[in-house]
Amino acid sequence: MAAASPVTFDDVRAAAARLEGVARRTPVLTSRTLNSLVGAEVFIKCENFQRVGAFKIRGAYNAAAQLSPEQLAKGIAAYSSGNHAQATALAARELGTSAVILMPEDAPRSKREATAGYGAEIVTYDRYTEDRTALGHALAEDRGLALIPPYDHPHVIAGQGTAALELLEETGPLDALVVPVGGGGLIAGSATAAKALHPGIRVVGVEPEAGDDTKRSLESGARVTLPVPRTIADGQALPTPGELTFAVNRRLVDGISLVSDAEIITAMRFAFERLKIVLEPSGATGLAALLAGRIDTASPRIGVIASGGNIDTRRFAELLGA
């Protein structure tokens, strides 16, 4: 008998109710130019317009809001390269508690400053030589904090799934859903929602070529660990998929496509020049896969989650060669 899923569609619906008035219902963008280029009707869920500039507030708040009053009084902790850091800091502020965030020393400056701006204490580490999961658990235990991991938690996964739920409520049935993959929380939640609503939908993840741990893991049937990837998509620079997310994704995800850093930059430029939106590298990987021909466009209606837009002007100009 197959093991029960750690997240159900009912969990995603409950998260949506919990997030009402907290997370924004982000817009869905269409473009005739994009449709013509790829030969399909494309719907882009713009999580770059979400609070904190990325989808992460959905999972962080959904998890934090279910803590006991006693635990909230003690505070919460998280580890993240940036977007989950900001989301957890904001969730803590919304719920009247404090947050301590473990961030890599080379996290983007804009993400560090935003996290501090929401009132969180930041503790740094070296992502290439230290284990953030072990450090995060030790930090939380030492200080008596509730640890909210960036993806490997059922409440976080359910919260992230509300992005796909909203998209499908607006567009109606889609033939395919394209989702960026880091630790796997966004695609696990999205696949849970999408397959419950439309069992025939294809769910395709996108990873940077340098960080294809989920693709390798799905192909091997077990979680694979790689050296920490070096890619411009810092939100996807992870060595291994989450345990819970992998359990969901091996059952619900239909495939993983890979994109190069150069293709990500092309997508960021297209988004800026033709769609008039700013995407960070991790937020642009789904669009990159579509523009690079890595997604089967025989499916006439395709949803893409643009997961975030947190990038400072200096880095944006540097990447686009301005």
Image (cartoon, rainbow, N blue to C red):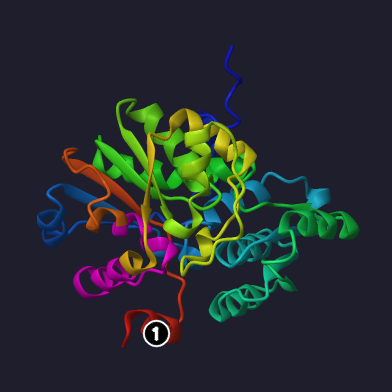
Q: Determine the image quadrant of residue 46.
A: bottom left
Q: Is residue 218 above or below residue 124?
A: above
Q: Closer to the camera, 29 or 68?
A: 29
Query: Is 267 part of what is drawn in magenta?
Result: yes
Where's residue 85, x and y in %? 62, 65
Residue named by callout 1? 318
Q: Nearer the viewer, residue 111 or 298?
A: 298
Image quadrant of residue 266? bottom left
Residue 29 in the magenta stretch? The answer is no
Q: Could you tell me which residue is drawn at 61 percent across and 57 percent down?
A: 227
- Callout 1 secondary element: helix
Residue depicted at 67% across the width and 67% down the height: 128
Which residue occupies 46% across, 33% down?
Answer: 192
152 lies left or right of 169:
right
Q: Amino acid at mark 1?
A: Glu
Task: Describe residue 7's horizontal placement relative to residue 203 as left or right.
Answer: right
What segment is highlighted magenta in the picture?
265-288
Residue 170 seen in the figure? yes
From the image, give the main secondary structure of the stretch colored magenta. helix
**Relative depth, front residue between 214 and 158:** 214
Residue located 69% across and 52% down the image: 148
Q: As displayed, is residue 14 above or below residue 73?
A: above
Counting from the top left corner in percent of width and height, residue 302 is at 24, 44
The image quadrant of residue 101 is: bottom right
